[in-house]
Structure formats: structure tokens, C-alpha cells
Amino acid sequence: MGDGFRYGAVMLAAGIGIPVLAALNAQLGSRIGSPVVAAVVLFCVALAGAVGVMLVSHGPSALAHVPTQPRHLFLAGLLVCFYVLSVTFVAPKFGVGNAVFFVLMGQMISAALIDQFGLFGAIARPITALRGAGLGFMAIGLFLIQRG
């Protein structure tokens, strides 16, 4: 198996996890009466998991490189926080499918722009007519899934 297949499988699993995360955390927030507390619990569990993987794969010495990194790179943590808080608040009121639909649309738009301009150190991949058509068909497909 090539790297592309393995990477694709990992990202497919991550994609499957997004609506499951939304549904589980929305349910936790509803049951305990606070979406914010549910998000904090999620982040604590996520931190424990990430620390465990770090310790097994790299050891704690890998943290020595963190203080020398550009500060803007840490905004990614705030984006994760925004996503988790927003989906935990919105999904119970709007539906997991609707919430994830708009997340996917936002991801498609953002990913296309990042690729088009090579933003944040990404490999530049221009939006050709074929890629644009593919994005359009994906958007139409997502819309039809939600309408059906």
C-alpha cells in the first residue's frame, strides 16, 4: 500500500470522527447542562490522549522546541476551541447533519484557498477548471444530502 492510501484512510477516519465528536459532545453538553463544560472535558481527554502519544513516539524532550516557534502558529489551538464550542452549542439546536454540512462547506472553501495561494506553508495547487468543477460538484452533493 502506498502512502496516499494510508493517508487517505487516516483522513477518512478523521472525517468520520467529526460528526461523531459533534453528536457525542453535544449530548454530553445537554446532559450536564453546559456545552462549555463539555468542551473542557473533551479537551482534557484530548490532551491526555495527545500527551500519551507524544510520550510514546517522541518523549517529553520534543516540547523543548515549542518556545521558539512563531506565536501565530498557536492560533490553531483557538480554531480547534472555536470549532468544538460552536458545534457543541449549535448541533443540538440545528442538527448534527446541518452543523457538519456547513463545517464541510467551510473546509472546502478554506482548503481550496489555502491550496490556491500556498498559504501557511502549504504546497500550492492552483484551482484549475477541473478542480473548480470538482469542488462545485462536492458542494452540490453536500447540499443534496442535506435536502434529501
Image: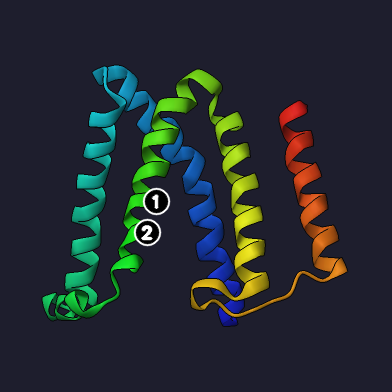
The residue that label 2 is drawn on is 76
Amino acid type assigned to the residue bearing label 2 in the image: Ala
Cα separation between marks 1 and 2 = 5 Å
Front residue of this view, candidates 78 and 14? 78
The residue that label 1 is drawn on is 79
Task: Give the x, y percent position of residue 60.
Answer: 12, 75
Task: Give the x, y percent position of residue 83.
Answer: 42, 43
Crowding near pointer 1: few (<14 within 10 Å), some, many (20+)? few
Give the residue displayed 36% in from the left and 36% down from the top.
Answer: 85
Q: Secondary structure at mark 1?
A: helix
Give the residue displayed 19% in from the left and 63% down from the top.
Answer: 52
Q: Secondary structure at mark 2?
A: helix
Q: Are marks 1 and 2 in contact (CB under 8 Å)?
A: yes
In the displayed structure, 83 sits above or below 27; it is below
Q: Is residue 50 left or right of residue 73?
A: left
Task: Give the x, y percent position of residue 113.
Answer: 64, 63
